[in-house]
Image (cartoon, rainbow, N blue to C red):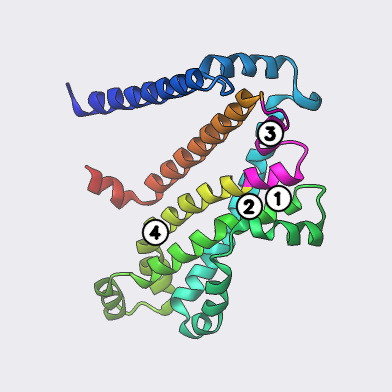
Amino acid sequence: MNKTYRYSLLSVLSVICVLGLWWAASIWNASLAGPVDTIERFGRLIGHPIMGVPLWMHVWASVRRIFVSFVAACVVGVSLGIAFGIFPTFKRIMWPVFSVIRPIPPLAWIPIVVLWVGIMGDTSKDIIIFIGIVMAIVINTQEGIRQTDDLLLKAGKLLGANKWQMLTEITLPSSIPAIFAGMKTGLSTGWMSLVAAEMIAAKEGIGFLINQSMKNSSDTALDFIGIILVALCSAVFTLLLNAIERKVCLWSKMRAK
């Protein structure tokens, strides 16, 4: 049995184990929907959408909000991380402020953001998700910049590279793995922020579906549908990021071989 087949088999077995534990928990607690109940509820949800909004529109609303916030967080986060990494004076001035804001949970900003931009529309949700994603990108980017190999920097200086060339041809390329790690970490936090924001201030989205399940304590199947949808969407985003990272970090592919 080759290694790839063995790993695939173990992955399938882990999924079966999770489904088995879920089924056992539903037997032990009758109020908890099991896998079969969730599948049946999914079929009813397709045929009878909540508030007349099809399921795909709820998924699309969440994916759209994540995508917009993620792109904005990447632009701001990478820019700030680079500034913290290459401008010591800027870091001395702004890092204390960033360090104070960073530990604040994104959900704590919801009342302020809602009062600031209103509850209607996507702006309030986008800001909350943005806050959840951007912090990890800033930290990982500046750490990647800071940990650039001194030998590479010395080699660049000996070859006569200017500051711009040092940044674009040495520092940034060596920081790409750390930047992508920050993106993946931020994306996970972003999904948590999305669900919370949609549960509080949305009329469509996966978080809205989960909130609807809370209004009826017996509809735990709808809650599981929301959880599974978040997991699947998050997995797709992560796979896309991994694919982009492999294309950008060609040396990582060579090391894997």
Circle 1/circle 3 CB separation < 8 Å: no
The disc placed on residue 214 is: 3
Look at label 2 and name its amino acid.
Answer: Ile
What type is the residue that disc 1 sits on? Lys
User: Between disc 2 and disc 4, whose residue precedes?
Assistant: 2
**Residue beneath label 1, please?**
125
Q: Nearer the viewer, mark 4 or mark 1?
A: 1
* Mark 2 to mark 1 CA distance (whole Å): 6 Å
| Disc 4: which residue | 178
Residue at 27% over, 75% down: 150
Secondary structure at badge 3 equals helix
Left or right of 151? Residue 222 is right
The three-letter amino acid code for the residue at tag 4 is Ala
- Compared to residue 171, the image places residue 39 above or below, namely above
* Residue at (51, 21) in percent of width and height: 26
Task: Give the CA separation, mark 2 to mark 4.
Answer: 21 Å
Q: Is residue 136 one of those drawn in magenta?
A: no
Residue 204 position, x and y percent, is 74, 36
Q: Is residue 202 above or below residue 7?
A: below
Q: Which residue is mark 2?
A: 129
* Chain part drawn in magenta: 194-217
* Image quarter in which the C terminus is found: top left
Instruction: Specify the principal SS of the magenta part.
Output: helix
- Disc 2 + disc 3, Cβ < 8 Å: no
Which is more foreground, mark 2 or mark 3?
3
